[in-house]
Image: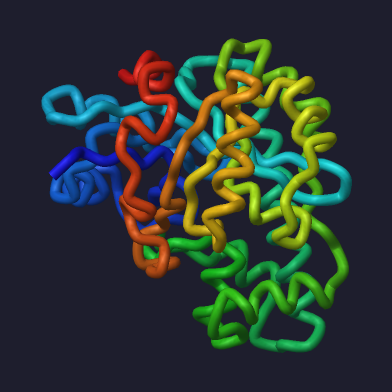
Amino acid sequence: MRPIIDLHMHTTASDGTQTPSELLKVILEKNIALFSITDHDSVGNIDEMILLTKEANVKFIPGVEVSAMYKGQEFHLLTYGIRTNDAELMNILSTNQIIREAHNRKVIEYVSTFAPEVSLSDYDAYDRKPSKGGWKSENYLSEKNVTHSLNDFFDIVNKMEEQLNFPDLEELLPKLSHLGYPVVLAHPPAYNRRQLLTFKTLDELRNLGISGIECYSPYFRFESDTTYYRNYCKRNNMLITCGSDHHGDFIPVRVLGIPRIVAEQISYDRLIEFAR
């Protein structure tokens, strides 16, 4: 069995359900040769995974999925080879975490107007269990039986008409590139209502500092779309990457190592340089 690659997954440091040791156990069972943790705006489990993989027969690239706004949409930037002692990067992530929690509180405040069992003071006292996956406001509303699915939660967010607004991509992307990190556009079908991003948009992103595209992802529905982004990367000497966007039991349909991608299908030789 040829070893496979998975460069996009989440742990208990953001909205995944697995600790580093739990995740590594499955990675080894699935014959994954190169992987990256890319938690949302968090590097909380990176140092632990570096230690765990020192003795394991697997290569690990420290990563993070940075959130940004681009033309009114939330975009995700997979940032690889990161250093957890990088003060500038930590400041970017800290700012995004503050924005996330402020939005969490607005969601709870909105729900409290029609659900008497919900209040900000009760939310503040709520002790989230990371093994549940998700995030604090989502967990809290689920335990209060206000929501019963992720769709329920996002229906509430849509009704309150208050968007989660991260810093502009035009501001963040050059900063990440300046720090020397390769930055890959995560799951392109997640944007633009699943329509292909135009060459003009891709050129704009590349000029701002995008150095690669996640061309293999469970978000892709058509092989022709994968080919479209792969060909763009090849023409512009950009990184071709892959990822399952695995969240453990929180989103069980995203299975570790799926899509099943091997070294020859991605920019393996360029990516392995960032392994620790």
The quadrant of the picture occupied by the C terminus is top left
155 w.r.t. 131: above or below: below
3 w.r.t. 188: above or below: above
Q: Is residue 16 left or right of residue 157?
A: left
Q: Is residue 132 left or right of residue 79?
A: left
266 w.r.t. 246: above or below: above
Coordinates of residue 56 in the picture (x, y in percent) = 13, 30
How is the model colour-coded? rainbow
Coordinates of residue 65 in the picture (x, y in percent) = 56, 39
Q: Residue at x 39, y 51 (%)?
A: 12
Q: Nearer the viewer, residue 273 or 161?
A: 273
261 w.r.t. 62: above or below: below
The quadrant of the picture occupied by the N terminus is top left
Coordinates of residue 156 in the picture (x, y in percent) = 74, 77
Q: Residue at x 66, y 68 (%)?
A: 121
**Count of numbered marks:** 0
Q: Quadrant of residue 108?
A: bottom right
Q: Residue at x 53, y 79 (%)?
A: 142
Is residue 97 visible in the rendered image? The answer is no
Is residue 244 visible in the rendered image? The answer is yes
Coordinates of residue 164 in the picture (x, y in percent) = 77, 54
Q: Nearer the viewer, residue 11 or 261?
A: 261
Q: Residue at x 87, y 49 (%)?
A: 72
Q: Nearer the viewer, residue 79 or 32?
A: 32
Q: Quadrant of residue 212?
A: top right
